[in-house]
Amino acid sequence: MTELPDRRLLLVHAHPDDESINNGATMAKYAAEGAHVTLVTCTLGEEGEVIPPELAHLAPDREDGLGPYRIGELTAAMKELGVTDHRFLGGPGRFRDSGMMGVEQNRRPGAFWSADIDEAAAYVVEVIREVRPQVLVTYDPHGGYGHPDHIQAHRVAVRAAELAAEDAFRRDLGDPWEIVKTYWNRVPQSVAENGFARLREALPELPFTESAAIDDVPGVVDDAVITTEIDGTAYAAAKAAAMRAHATQIEVAEPWFVLSNQLAQPLFTTEYYELVDGERPQGRRETDLFEGIQRVEAGVR
């Protein structure tokens, strides 16, 4: 078995681009520091809207070529972040983008939203048992903002962490492994408010004409919920470049960006998390996802 670095981080995301928006600075930081960073992306994002007019033919209601194109975008984004271990759940195209909640695409054969949880989770179990991550990052049970694929990614990731630790489950997928810490992606309310206040001041000078609202940002919660903040300031350029690589979905004008709705949002380079499984810090925020890991692995709890 190939020897792995001491620190190993697994992220489970729904579509290409979610990882760069939510965790780009975190991923770049840990990759640069020598940690093993693994990304599992659950769909190809086939149902996404296409921003550049010259690529409009890729849309699902035209050539339906967006999914394969986004494989290339994700590869380019991971190169910007220095992440070399990125995979699609069950292989590229195994599960299809389900579209927004309540649309016909939710029920299509192969849609991620309609996938059997344990079947999909088994693919993540195999990854967990191979790379043995101590830390898992994914969405909250609401998927951050209610998208069916984000909700399903949460369910699959959490179930996979449970199954990977079970001695009796699918030993053909490797030896059992227990993840020590699980985090949900978050944004503190105060950070979102400050970011949008700065955006409103800057908007007249930007190529974007309208601002999004705080409610458009996934995972915004009361500041007291935040357990962990990762200062990714040194990796701001890498995060922006990774987001820019997802050109069918994102336009970037640092430190702002828009999605296909053309509503500007702040590009956050300090990234925030809620620790939901693991020893929570008391009276302070962690500044390292791996805090306490070495003590735990050494049997000191």
Image: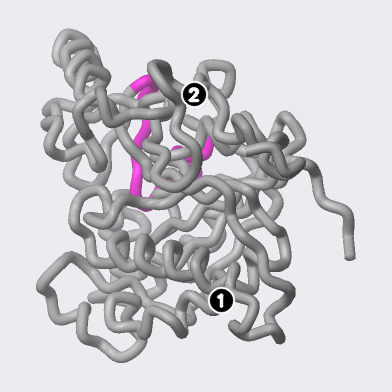
Q: Quadrant of the C terminus?
A: top right
Q: Magenta span covers which residues? A: 241-255
Residue 142 shown in magenta: no
Q: Is residue 55 above or below residue 166?
A: above
Q: Nearer the viewer, residue 96 or 163?
A: 163
Residue under label 1, please give it. Answer: 123
Q: Position of residue 46 (x, y in %)?
A: 36, 70
- Residue at coordinates 63% horizontally, 48% vertically from top-left? 134
- Residue at coordinates 55% horizontally, 70% vertically from top-left? 124
How much space separates mark 1 and mark 2, taking CA atoms?
30 Å
- Residue at coordinates 38% horizontally, 64% vertically from top-left? 153
User: Mark 1 falls on what kind of element?
Assistant: helix
Residue under label 2, please give it. Answer: 286
Q: Position of residue 4 (x, y in %)?
A: 82, 51
What crowding class fits label 2: few (fewer than 14 Cα within 10 Å), some (14-19), or many (20 or more)? Answer: many
Amino acid type, mark 1: Tyr
Q: Nearer the viewer, residue 272 or 132?
A: 132
Q: Position of residue 5 (x, y in %)?
A: 80, 44
CB contact under 8 Å: marks 1 and 2:
no
Residue 254 shown in magenta: yes
Amino acid type, mark 2: Glu
Q: Quadrant of residue 107 in the image?
A: bottom left
The reply, left or right, for residue 216 in relation to residue 255 is left
Of circles 1 and 2, the one toward us is 2
* Nearer-N-terminus badge (1/2): 1
User: Mark 2 falls on what kind of element?
Assistant: loop
Q: Is residue 179 above or below residue 29?
A: below
The reply, left or right, for residue 83 in relation to residue 101 is right
The numbered dot on residue 26 is: none
- Residue at coordinates 45% horizontally, 63% vertically from top-left? 157
Q: Nearer the viewer, residue 55 or 48?
A: 48
Q: Position of residue 120 (x, y in %)?
A: 46, 79
